[in-house]
Amino acid sequence: MTRRTASCACGQLSLSCEGEPVRVSICHCLACKLRTGSAFSYQVRYPEAAVTVHGRYSDFAKAGDSGNVARFGFCPQCGSTVFWRPDALPGIVLVAAGAFADPAFPPPPQVSVYGERRHPWVALPAGCEDLD
């Protein structure tokens, strides 16, 4: 079985992820833009049972544009958000795609959400379904 590691910028917090992701997506909501400081967030979804957390992390709970709350795990040393658990999806862990630091993984996003808030210069990759 495939095992991948995601980590924060300083390496104190890491995740071991077993198997293939359930879904790869991007989100254009305002909450994700604020959290990432970027035009969208890019995340990989795993079943919680496939993810093992190593190191210390702090939690930050925030409601997104949908009103649903997610609990973000970030490194208390460097501040990198590495993963989050959305209350609306029990048993699921989302991992920041960039935390894998592997240009070959993950595959391009399969799903895009909050497309009405997408910057006009952002083009979706071929095969990415826009759910909005």
Image (cartoon, grey):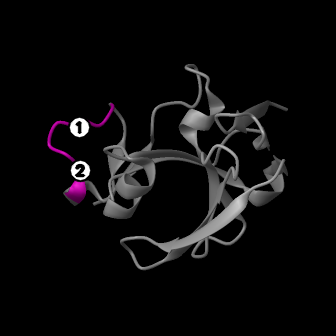
Q: Marks 2 and 1, Cα distance to the nearest angstrom?
A: 7 Å
Left or right, 31 with reference to 1: left
Dominant secondary structure of the residues highlighted in magenta in the image? loop
Give 101 or 113, whichever is nearer the viewer.
101
Query: Residue type at mark 2?
Result: Arg
The disc at residue 122 is: 1
- Residue at the spot x=36%, y=71% of the render? 65
Query: Residue type at mark 1?
Result: Val
Residue stretch in magenta: 117-125
The disc at residue 118 is: 2
Left or right, 21 with reference to 43: right
Q: Quadrant of residue 44?
A: top right
Q: Are marks 2 and 1 in contact (CB under 8 Å)?
A: yes
Mark 2 crowdedness (10 Å alpha carbons): few <14, some 14-19, many ≥20: some
Task: Tell me the SS state at disc 1.
Answer: loop
Task: Tell me the SS state at disc 2.
Answer: loop
Position of residue 119 measured from the top left corner of the image (x, y, whole percent) = 19, 46
